[in-house]
Amino acid sequence: MEKPSYKELLDAGVHFGHLKRKWNPKMHPYIFMERKGIHIIDLNRTADCLQDAADAMKQMAKSGKKILFVATKKQHVISFRSR
């Protein structure tokens, strides 16, 4: 998998997190900053974790396991259906 550029991650809105008051404390290492009550996700950590996830999925696919993608945002569900 080709590593996505920071511009692609920004354009996709990957950096937008949840409202500050609804956050999970386990997300603390992945939060870059807070702006206007919304946590901004650290894109450096995101890119690294995406690569780790891609490597894990490659291993699962090689072993014949099935992978299920679940989207929780309406715009993501629509983009998966159109492919």
Image (spheres, grey):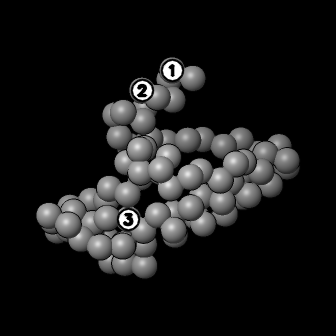
Residue at the spot x=74%, y=58% of the render? Answer: 55
Residue at the spot x=27%, y=66% of the render? Answer: 39
Q: Which mark is residue 64?
A: none
Front residue of this view, candidates 2 and 54: 2
| Residue 48 pos. (x, y %) | 60, 66
Cβ atoms under marks 1 and 2 closer than 8 Å: yes
| Residue 76 pos. (x, y %) | 42, 36
- Find disc 3 in the rendering and name its residue: 41
Q: SS at mark 2?
A: helix
Q: Which mark is residue 82?
A: 1
Front residue of this view, candidates 7 and 21: 7
| Residue 12 pos. (x, y %) | 42, 44
Q: Disc 3 marks which amino acid?
A: Ile
- Position of the C terminus by quadrant: top right
19 horizontally vs 58: left or right? left
Q: Which mark is residue 78?
A: 2
Q: SS at mark 1?
A: loop
Farthest residue in the front direction?
A: 7
Q: Is residue 73 above or below residue 14?
A: above
Residue at the spot x=46%, y=28% of the render? Answer: 79
Q: SS at mark 3?
A: strand
Of pointers 2 and 3, the one earlier in the residue sequence: 3
How crowded is the residue under tag 2: few (<14 C-alpha within 10 Å), some, or many (20+)?
few
**Residue 26 in view (yes/no):** no
| Residue 70 pos. (x, y %) | 49, 42
Q: Disc 1 marks which amino acid?
A: Ser
Q: Disc 2 marks which amino acid?
A: Ile
**Residue 79 in view (yes/no):** yes
Q: Is residue 32 above or below residue 47?
A: below
Between marks 3 and 1, how big is the CA–CA gap?
27 Å
